[in-house]
Every structure is written in structure tokens, then in C-alpha cells.
Amino acid sequence: MGEAKMLKMLKSLLVVAVLAGSSLVSGCASSTNGLAAIPAGDLSVLRLEPGDRIKVQIPDLQGADAEYAVDQTGVIALPLVEEVKISGLTLREAEKAIEKALLDKRILVRPNVTLQAASLRPIYILGEIGKPGQYEFREGLTVFSIISLAGGYTYRADTTSMVITRTVNGRKVTGRASENTVVMPGDQIRIVEKWF
């Protein structure tokens, strides 16, 4: 093979290598490329899930005012009523479900049930963070708040974009987030690695 032909072949290989490398770099520059922004959370329409704890107040039913955990089957066990399925319901819908159970069992004629969230599903944060793990949900927390609780970014972190996986209307949705994104119970936050 002649020297000219060899040089031409090496140039071609070099061009291919450079193009492959640049597409790899642009693909790795941010693993959030192509992701839509995560839908905003709204606690008023948050659906209860197993592991959530709620405070129940039923003024006319002695011994019912207490904190209850939603078990793995999605129910809470109330005095006299026994089990009421509330998983998948909002707090207001769960109030109505408990009121219906009290009426159906003829325990109260005009039940008045009030529910409040006591503690909801934890938030998980992983990736380029000082202390990845599980953190307690509190209303009003942002991604930045959780990052602070989790020991801050590592030196490799992409501090401009994060990824959140969240349950929206019963299905898992993954989207791009920023430090100002308000977190929801059960959110899984991933701090991605910055390449350049």
C-alpha cells in the first residue's frame, strides 16, 4: 500500500474518530438532554400510598382521633369501621370514603371526618451528592433544600440540572428539574455527573 493511500486512510479514520468522539461528548454533556421539565407538584391532589401516615379526626366517634398508617394493602384500620381502602385517594377523597364507611356500617348518622397528612413518603436523593439516601418529606422543600441536607454536591456534579422521578396520576414520570423545583413525597432525585 502506498504512502499516500495510507495517509488518506488514516485521515478518514481520524475524521470518523473525531465525529464519534464529539457525538459521545455532546451526548454525555448532560444526561438531562431531551427530558421535559418535571410537572409541578400539588399537595392538594396528592394521592395517598402505602407508608403514608395520616391524622384522623372524627369528633363523634370516641377513640377514633389518632394517627394511622396506610398499610401495604392500601387500607387503614379504624375502630368499629375496621378497614377502609384509601390508597390512591386524595385526602379529601379519603375523608369521603371514611364517612361512607361510617354511614354504611350505621356507626354515625352524620359523620364529619377531617384528615391531615402526618408524615408522607420519604424523598430519595442519589448520584453526585455528599450523603445520598432517604430524607423525610416536609412541605415546601425544594431540590436545593434536599441537596443541602444531603451534604451538598460532589465536585463532579452538574449543578445546573437534576433529574426527578415522580408519581403523577398513578404513573412514574421522569423529568428535568432545577434547584428551585419543589419536591413531592416519594420523589427520587438524581444529581447527574458533569462531564466538562
Image (spheres, rainbow, N blue to C red):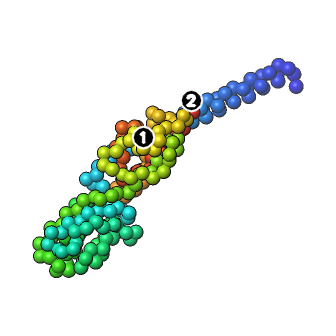
As helix, strand or loop, the secondary structure at mark 1 comes to: helix
Q: Amino acid at mark 1?
A: Ser
Label 2 Cα crowd, 10 Å radius (few <14 / some 14-19 / many 20+)? few
167 or 77: nearer the viewer: 77
State the image quarter where residue 6 is shown: top right
Task: Report which residue position mark 1 lands on.
Answer: 148
State the image quarter where residue 60 is shown: bottom left
Q: Amino acid at mark 2?
A: Phe
Q: Name the outermost residue toward the right.
A: 1
Residue 101's label in the rendered image is: none
As helix, strand or loop, the secondary structure at mark 2 comes to: loop
- Which x, y percent locates residue 48? 32, 61
- Which x, y percent locates residue 152? 47, 39
Where's the C terminus, which quadrant?
A: top right
For image coordinates 38% across by 41% down, the residue present is 145
- Which x, y percent locates residue 193? 54, 38
32 or 132: nearer the viewer: 132
For image coordinates 46% across by 44% down, the residue present is 150
Q: Is residue 49 above or below residue 126?
A: below
For image coordinates 43% across by 41% down, the residue present is 147
For image coordinates 42% across by 40% down, the residue present is 148
Q: Is residue 103 above or below residue 1?
A: below
Closer to the chain start, of discs 1 and 2, is 1
Q: Is residue 45 left or right of residue 187?
A: left
Q: Name the outermost residue toward the top.
A: 4
Q: Is residue 34 above or below residue 87?
A: above
180 or 11: nearer the viewer: 180
Where's the N terminus, which quadrant?
A: top right
| Residue 88 visible somewhere in the drawing | no
Task: Report which residue position mark 2 lands on.
Answer: 196
Q: Is residue 111 left or right of residue 118?
A: left
